[in-house]
Amino acid sequence: MNSNLTRRSSSAPLTRRELLRRSGGGFGAVALAALLSDDSASTRKLMAGERTSPLSAKQPQFAAKAKRVIFLFMPGGPSQVDTFDPKPQLTQDDGKPAPKLYLGQQRNLLASPWKFQPYGESGLEVSELFPRTAQCVDDLCIIRSMVTDDPNHPGGCLLMHTGERVSSRPSLGAWVTYGLGTENRDLPGFVAIGPGPIIEGARQYGASFLPAAYQGTFVSNLDQPLKNLAGSAAPDQQRRDLDALARLNELHRVSRADDTRLSARIDSFELAYRMQTAAPEAFSLQGETAETARLYGLDQPKTEVFGKQCLLARRLVERGVRFVQLYHTTGGFQPWDQHSDLKGGHERNALETDTPIAGLLKDLKQRGLFDDTLVIWGGEFGRTPAREGTANGRDHHPFGFTMWMAGAGIKRGMAYGATDEYGWDAIEKPVHVHDLHATILHLLGLDHEQLTYRHAGRDFRLTDVYGNVVTGILA
């Protein structure tokens, strides 16, 4: 007979291993029984499936202008002098030696191949690359004096998204949801959408040392945004299973309070359960009218992909999602990186994004969402005003570039700051990435110096020890 199946004689002495096994099981049973019999409010809530979510909506620190954010990120670095920062002197001096060396090398100036013209009542000039976005120029605040610290894609993208170009830090969206939670408990508070690979991957939308619940939910397949969402059991059975699992997980979690991963797992189970009803409707574009589809360019192959991203962003913020990050990665992980063939590359990228962006701005206004939604456009840096080598391209340029903001709490129809006559250096009212982050948080009712998280013995914040709110662009 198998010795493992033989009942131990009552007179046989217990081994040390057997004693520990039996005692351990007994202690676990006692602890579980105590947890299940506890009549405290927290345990009753836990048994009822009412565990407090870290994403519950929180009050801002002061009156907010913005309730939500849509960040339209253009990986690779759009050229400021070819999009929203016209430079007549650059056109006049085309081919002449640039006034500054770049990485120790002398390069010649390269005029923009596109014409600029004024639009709207503001008369702001926009390149012919963006004719539809230009029609919305009276709603834009174009920041022409952006500066950053890193001329390389990985560091530049991380700095723009996390405030730090090297080490792992929480992303902007994670900080926002940490500070404010979300308005819809049945959907994620932070969603990132990109159809292609993203440089530095999840670090751009991750939570790092913040509780894991605040990281972004990433969507890459626009036709099937959330896989494996449907449950295999009836809702009431799923509810009972989740309650039982939550109680066991909570027992495990109590002795591991410093590790947020289990809490995030419990929260994700609960969110997935609720999303079975809310998410299919939120992520489905089938109910949109043909007019709306055309507005976002869904009827054209070139604009369909980014159009779907922008339309999903509107649907999500409309339903209470706090932060939506869009990555234009249709043409690769950094499609705006035109070291050569500037004309072909920027024309392709602008064609894919111009109609959807204009559609998003117009749709937000039509639906009454524009005044409390903050929309941001830009890349990790700009492009040099000089030609790169003999090719008709431009190199990375962190010294002066353009981003724009629109919507909640932002002055409209204005250009802020300026670069020099060639678009080389920000010479008037420079805005660092830390200043941009401080301003975004301010519009959401959060003080960037007070929104902190204790980690590794110090208080961290998105802007580290830097950053000033750019008051000149606030309405």
Image: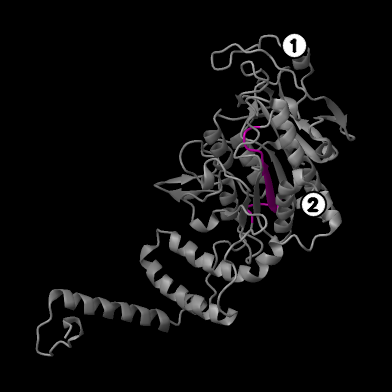
> Height in image: 261 above or below 303?
below
User: Mark 1: few, some, or many residues within 10 Å (few <14, many ≥20)?
Assistant: some
User: Which secondary structure dominates the residues rendered in magenta?
Assistant: loop
Q: How was the colour assigned to the protein in this rendering?
A: one colour
* Residue at disc 2, secondary structure: helix
Q: Is residue 417 visible?
A: no
Three-letter code, disc 2:
Leu
Q: Residue at x 68, y 49 (%)?
A: 69
Where is mark 2, residue-wise? 364
Q: Position of residue 172 (x, y in %)?
A: 58, 46
The residue wearing badge 1 is 93
In-image side of 16 versus 95 (left or right): left
Q: Quick one: 267 or 455, which is closer to the camera?
A: 267
Farthest residue, direction top: 96
User: Which region is colored magenta?
Assistant: 60-77
Indicate the secondary structure of the residue bearing disc 1. Answer: loop
**Splitting the image into 4 quarters, where does residue 227 fall?**
bottom right
Q: Nearer the viewer, residue 86 or 451?
A: 86
- Asked whether residue 207 appears in the rendered view, the answer is yes
Left or right relative to 378: residue 122: right
- State the image coordinates of residue 357 (x, y, percent, origin top left): 76, 44
280 to the left or right of 132: left
Measuring 83% from the left and 51% from the top, which residue is drawn there? Answer: 294
Q: Give the Cα separation between the discs numbered 2 and 1.
A: 41 Å
Q: How many marks?
A: 2
- Could you say where residue 447 lies in the image, as x and y percent from the top left? 60, 46
* Residue 65 belongs to the span the image colors magenta: yes
Residue 251 located within the stretch drawn in magenta: no
- Where is residue 459 shown, x and y percent of the image? 46, 46
Report crowding for label 2: few under 14, some 14 to 19, many 20 or more residues within 10 A (C-alpha): many
